[in-house]
């Protein structure tokens, strides 16, 4: 029955279904439908009461019955007084002749129901509201049972008053009134059912938008079809155009779970080719269009079938939606009707949108995964030294947790590379990785950089801006040189780490952030704590796990491994055939102390790639010995300009000199910015500021 669907889909019982979230709500159920008989039994006493009033008679003198012809059998729906033995014969005659028939003490008339659309009217309605292609539906001659409405019985009313046949006028009035009652009732039932179907479809469709697994999606769509159409089975046939096959899922009872048919076979094939719905029910000849082989294999009997095209918003047909075996009950003959065509066509539209958007999401996910892998591979943590191997193991252990990590190590040892390694091995790999160099920012800027600011928060704040904490939401924030953070910055950072909310500068609204923090420093934080330059509580917050990168010089032959890695990368970038290091250059690299660590090595190899051209790299090509404390050579461009008679202005010359001087100092210190700053007589953060003023890059 409609109220207790029992179709064959696995997991039809939602409570027992192994659905992962999101789950389709189950709080609504199909409306219970009163049968015509129930309505007749309810309304007839009322009508007879009126007749009794009109006739100034009492009910005992009235004998009245309503009988109905259901297919080939007669049934009595209502009777008052002694039942008339010839009632069915008289009713049959009245229906056949279409007029009042009198027999013995009874007169009889057919009850004309109003309000219920005729079969053809309903079929028209389906054409105008179904899928784009269904609007072109023409009931095919082959669909011999198309448009047949479910069993609405032929009804007749019989009436006798005071032992005489009731007057024809009274009989007509009574039958028209009863017909209207039934018509209105059916209209209301149809509306209620339609509302329930639409609500069910919309509630399901909302959940389909969130399902990523296509089996789960198709199964849910099929289940919904069974529910709203009150039928046994439903299958979505998706079109594999290149192989000219229709792949049906869910394929219940099919070995291997895949139901594949030729794209021009059977009724689904007809629908695909014609883009029009087709329906069939037992009694008519299926002309071999129903796949009985599948029925036999599953010990199943298809007695009715409905199939509609699935057309996307680009007017491309992507498949066929099939429903099998409408339930047979008081309201339905077991055949699908035109209203079902409309319902399944609507459901097909929702299904197409869900399938399309799931495919788009799957494509986007694939693209994102590819980009994430590319990003992860673009900066690998190269090295095979035991210390690096241990580090990799520990990093992999800590990656899946959300613990704060503090990375220690000299400048250029690869602290940011290690932080990225942790990020790309964590659940956050699809989120952003955002790096901030705390030393490169003065206190006033640091706060707005990290936490963002509201419009008008300070003079230059012309608009609202998100801070790095917000930008790294769902991902990782790498705080480099955290030891150089100002006391004010440290206090605010601690608060964010503890409360997991940021408040933008000039704002008051706390904004929740889900950001993992990985901090790094080349400074001995314990000494800074002792000197009251770093907060101990912040240190404990950041230092839940600490990982230390060894200096490059202590990594043995990793130097060569890294050199080859950089050589290959830079040669690929400039399209150069990769040269080889000769013995002398290999020895020199192993012997070199690498004060600037991996960064110095990387810069050395980059220079070699650009400035040498042979297929062998010799020791002298490496130019490994920076002259300690040497004055920078006067910038070449300035020299050329002066020699060529072009005098550039003093400011520009001074700027060029400063750039060259700073570059030389950094190089002489092997990339160690703290040392370079100290040699130049500047605090490290002032050196960064100066570099930015001069338009120099403060990253690699
Ligand atoms: N193990 C490694 N494998 C590959 N490349 C590395 C490795 N370690 C460092 N590098 C490269 O060396 C350069 C410096 O690395 P990184 O910026 O991570 O060092 P750092 O310790 O964070 O430096 P700083 O303390 O100056 O910020 C980068 O170009 C990085 O790609």
Image (cartoon, rainbow, N blue to C red):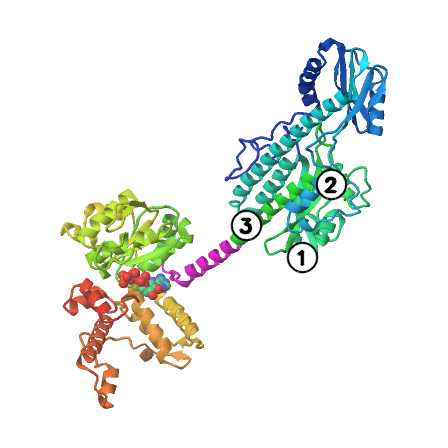
Q: Is residue 695 left or right of residue 50?
A: left
Which image quarter holds the N terminus?
top right
Question: Quick check: 552 above or below 8?
Answer: below
Is any atom of residue 73 visible in this view?
Answer: yes
What is the span of residues highlighted in magenta in the rendered image?
363-385
Q: Is residue 238 above or below residue 331?
A: below
Counting residues from the N terminus, which is met first, the one under dot 3 or under dot 1?
A: 1
Q: Earlier in the sequence, mark 2 or mark 1?
A: 2
Name which quarter of the figure residue 662 lies in. Answer: bottom left
The x and y percentages for residue 160 are 79, 15
Residue at 38% over, 60% down: 381
* Mark 2, secondary structure of its residue: helix
Residue bearing mark 1: 241
Q: Secondary structure at mark 1?
A: loop
Q: Are marks 2 and 1 in contact (CB under 8 Å)?
A: no
Residue 39 position within the rendered picture, expressed as x and y whole percent measured from the top left: 67, 22
Q: Is residue 352 left or right of residue 406?
A: right
Query: Residue 356 location in percent, x, y?
Result: 57, 51
Total numbered badges shown on the rendered structure: 3
Disc 2/disc 3 C-alpha distance (Å): 37 Å
CA–CA distance in space, label 2 to label 1? 35 Å
Does residue 231 appear left or right of residue 167 in this picture?
left
Label 3: element kind: helix
Q: Residues within 10 Å of mark 1 (few under 14, many from 20)?
A: few
> Of discs 2 and 1, which sits in the foreground?
2
Sequence order check, earlier mark of 2 and 3: 2
Residue sitting at 19 percent across and 48 percent down? 535
Q: Which residue is mark 2?
A: 120
Whether residue 554 is visible here, answered yes or no, is: no
Q: Nearer the viewer, residue 224 or 109?
A: 109
Residue 155 position within the rendered picture, expressed as x and y whole percent measured from the top left: 77, 26
Residue assigned mark 3: 358
């Amino acid at each position: 029955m409609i109220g207790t669907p029992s179709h064959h889909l696995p997991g039809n019982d939602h409570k027992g279904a192994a659905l992962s979230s999101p789950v389709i709500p189950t709080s609504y159920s199909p409306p219970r439908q009163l049968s015509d008989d129930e309505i007749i039994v309810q309304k007839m006493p009322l009508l007879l009461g009126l007749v009794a009033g009109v006739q100034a008679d009492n009910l005992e003198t009235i004998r009245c019955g309503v009988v109905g012809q259901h297919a080939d059998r007669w049934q009595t729906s209502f009777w008052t007084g002694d039942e008339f033995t010839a009632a069915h014969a008289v009713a049959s005659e009245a229906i056949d002749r279409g007029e009042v028939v009198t027999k013995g003490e009874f007169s009889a008339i057919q009850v004309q129901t109003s309000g219920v659309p005729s079969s053809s009217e309903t079929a028209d309605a389906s054409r105008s509201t179904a899928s784009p292609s269904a609007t072109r539906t023409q009931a095919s001659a082959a669909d011999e049972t198309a448009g047949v409405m479910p069993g609405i019985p032929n009804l007749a009313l019989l009436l006798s008053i005071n032992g005489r046949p009731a007057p024809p006028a009274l009989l007509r009035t009574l039958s028209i009134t009863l017909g209207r009652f039934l018509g209105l009732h059916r209209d209301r039932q149809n509306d209620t059912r339609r509302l329930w179907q639409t609500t069910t479809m919309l509630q399901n469709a909302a959940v389909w938008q969130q399902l990523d697994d296509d089996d789960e999606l198709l199964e849910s769509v099929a289940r919904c079809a069974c529910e709203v159409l009150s039928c046994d089975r439903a299958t979505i046939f998706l079109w594999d155009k290149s192989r000219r096959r229709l792949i049906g899922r869910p394929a219940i009872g099919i070995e291997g779970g895949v139901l594949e048919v030729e794209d021009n076979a059977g009724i689904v094939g007809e629908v695909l080719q014609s883009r029009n719905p087709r329906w069939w029910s037992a009694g008519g000849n299926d002309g071999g269009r129903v796949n009985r082989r599948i029925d036999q294999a599953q010990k199943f009997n298809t007695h009715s079938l409905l199939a509609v095209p699935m057309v996307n918003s680009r007017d491309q047909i992507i498949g066929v939606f099939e429903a099998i075996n409408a339930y047979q009950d008081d309201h339905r003959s077991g055949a699908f009707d035109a209203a079902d065509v409309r319902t399944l066509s609507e459901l097909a539209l929702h299904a197409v949108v869900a399938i399309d958007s799931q495919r788009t999401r799957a494509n986007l996910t694939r693209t994102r995964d590819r980009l994430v892998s590319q990003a992860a591979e673009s900066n690998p943590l190269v090295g095979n030294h035991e210390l690096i191997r241990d580090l990799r193991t520990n990093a992999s252990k800590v990656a899946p947790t959300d613990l704060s990590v503090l990375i220690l190590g000299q400048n250029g040892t690869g602290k940011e590379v290690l932080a990225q390694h942790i990020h790309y091995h964590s659940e956050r790999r699809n989120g952003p990785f955002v790096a901030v160099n705390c030393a490169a920012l003065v206190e006033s800027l640091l706060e707005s950089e990290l936490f963002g600011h509201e419009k008008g928060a300070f003079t230059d704040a012309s608009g609202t801006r998100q801070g790095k904490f917000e930008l790294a939401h769902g991902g990782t924030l790498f705080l480099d040189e955290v030891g150089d953070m100002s006391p004010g910055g440290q206090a605010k950072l601690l608060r964010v780490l503890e409360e997991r909310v940021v408040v933008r500068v000039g704002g008051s609204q706390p904004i929740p952030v889900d950001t993992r923090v990985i901090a790094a420093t080349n400074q001995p934080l314990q000494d800074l704590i002792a000197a009251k330059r770093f907060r101990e509580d912040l240190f404990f917050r950041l230092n839940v796990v600490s990982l230390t990168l060894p200096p490059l010089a202590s990594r043995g032959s990793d130097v060569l491994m890294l050199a080859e890695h950089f050589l290959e990368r830079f040669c690929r970038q400039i399209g150069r055939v990769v040269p080889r290091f000769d013995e002398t250059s290999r020895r020199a690299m192993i012997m070199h102390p690498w004060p600037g660590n991996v960064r110095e090595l990387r810069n050395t190899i980059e220079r070699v790639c650009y400035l040498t051209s042979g297929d062998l790299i010799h020791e002298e090509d490496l130019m490994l010995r920076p002259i300690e404390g040497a004055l920078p050579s006067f910038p070449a461009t300035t020299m050329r300009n002066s020699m060529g008679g072009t005098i550039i202005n003093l400011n520009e010359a001074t700027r060029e000199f400063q750039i060259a001087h700073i570059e030389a100092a950094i190089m002489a210190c092997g990339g160690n910015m703290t040392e370079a700053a100290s040699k130049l007589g500047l605090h490290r953060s002032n050196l960064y500021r100066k570099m930015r003023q001069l338009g120099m890059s403060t990253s690699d």
